[in-house]
Image: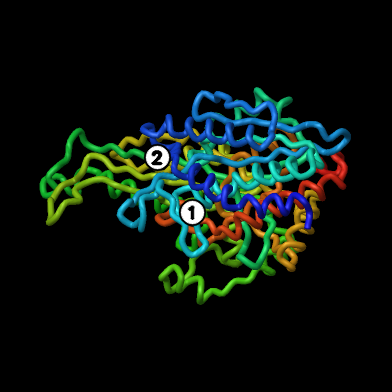
Amino acid sequence: MANWQSYLEDNQEQFQAEMLEFLRIPSISSLKAHFQDVAKAADWVAARMKKAGIEQVSVMETGGHPVVYGQWLNAENKPTILIYGHFDTQPVDPLELWDNPPFEPVIKDGKVVARGASDDKGNMLVPILAVEALLAAEGSLPVNVKFIFEGQEEIGSPQLPAFIESYKDLLACDLVLSADGGQWGADQPALWVGLRGLCALEINVMGANSDLHSGSYGGVVQNPLHALVQLLASMRDSQGNILVKGFYDDVRDLSEQDRERIAAVPFNEAEYKEALGIDALFGEEGYTPYERGWARPTLEINGMWGGFQGEGIKTVLPNEAHAKISCRLVADQDPKDILECLKAHIKEHSPAGVSISLEVEESTANPYLMPAEHPGNKVAGKILEQLYGKEPLYVRAGGSIPFCSLILEQLGVYTVVFGFGLKDEKAHAPNEFFRLSSFEKGQKAYCLLLHKLAETSAEALRTL
């Protein structure tokens, strides 16, 4: 048994207690009332990094929620690895569906239950503990390591592009490891090679200068709700094909190898539908469910409202209607271009008799796609196979980690997603949890991976 492994085993009780302490901080980045809690979480992370032996630790301002940076750069002629994660969390609503208060973590049945346990506090603590174990047991690290932990991932990392641009030299590295992510199953590893991007906007439809009597004005004056429905219906056909001009122009087609890798991921349609409580799947013809969910773009209505919604009936033409839409984007699509396509479509298809204004969500995320055969994936894959006794699946995610595409665009470096959350751990939902077995396995995995990366040249890891 390696000395670092003994260190990890001897300190698991303490590490679990520290994770619970971390989880008690209600660092909800989307709520102004918790702004100082996000800052408190940043201070906690900085203190824990210093305790681990990480050097030059600092809490850095961004103009929004902070970033925590640290480094250990004493491995001469070895690659530099940047480790990423986030310490902010999602809100906790609906509160009544939690079995225990969301920021009062409990351990039961080998799981720690709390908001942020899996996404991403438990996961991002893992590499800090692994580095501590290596430094304590060996006195040094096998590679140079930098850390960047952010407090705004759950709101789309709005200040991170400018931050990375300002600190390119500080963040310069040969490969990124993301502690935000997961494995396919408790006994099945995975390498996440693709993430979809995101853009969103709100549509506001205004009609007459007040609500109107539907008997007096129905059929004479445009109803903003009907106008909104007509506009939204023009954006997508009954099969889910997006009708916005230019929307698909830059979509990168799936190669045969891409489709073979996706097809290798087990999928049981009956179980999938049963778990969701639906009787049929939906989407573009010619693509499998995973292909549609991982490698095809979407345009979805996230919410729409207007008019009378109380009990009973009110015969009224409302004077306004609203909808929120979002688009998940895939390789080579640019959120800014897609937003321009949407604006042009809305202008062209706006019904007469109403005025329309748009509110564009500032936070966007570019899609991210990493070559499956990248040296970083090969090294990580060997470690995962060693730990699980199985080769990893090559999978993609329908959601976004904005940092991955940002760091590729600005520094030309790929990110290996190396987290240990599992898809059943209710991230973003009530009773979120993280398995203690994954917490321990992740620490071992990072120690093994950092040693293995020391055998690879910096030049190979920077391959694009």
Residue 194 visible (yes or no): no
- State the quadrant of the C terminus: top right
Nearest to the observer: residue 60 or residue 345: 60
Tag 2: amino acid: Glu
Q: How many marks?
A: 2
Which class describes the residues within 10 Å of circle 2: few (<14), some (14-19), or many (20+)? some
Decide if residue 310 is on the left or right side of residue 39. left
Decide if residue 13 is on the left or right side of residue 389. left
Of marks 1 and 2, which one's residue comes earlier in the chain? 2
Describe the element under mark 2 as helix, strand or loop: strand
Which residue is label 1 attached to?
427
Looking at the picture, does residue 436 appear above or below residue 454? below
Q: Residue at x 29, y 43 (%)?
A: 321
Describe the element under mark 1 as helix, strand or loop: loop
- State the quadrant of the N terminus: bottom right
In the orientation shown, which residue stands out farthest toward the bottom? 270
Q: Residue 327: percent from the left, percent from the top?
A: 51, 47
Question: How much space separates mark 1 and mark 2, taking CA atoms?
Answer: 26 Å
Q: Residue 446: percent from the left, percent from the top?
A: 71, 49
Decide if residue 297 is on the left or right side of residue 114. right
Residue 61 lies in what quarter of the image? top right
Q: Residue 162: percent from the left, percent from the top?
A: 60, 26
Looking at the picture, does residue 98 appear above or below residue 180? below
Nearest to the observer: residue 66 or residue 200: 66
Residue 264 visible (yes or no): yes
Q: Residue 146: percent from the left, percent from the top?
A: 71, 34
Q: Residue at x 66, y 48 (%)?
A: 331
In the orientation shown, which residue stands out farthest toward the front? 10
Q: Residue at x 78, y 49 (%)?
A: 376
Q: Residue at x 42, y 40 (%)?
A: 26
Which residue is label 2 attached to?
202
Which class describes the residues within 10 Å of circle 1: few (<14), some (14-19), or many (20+)? many
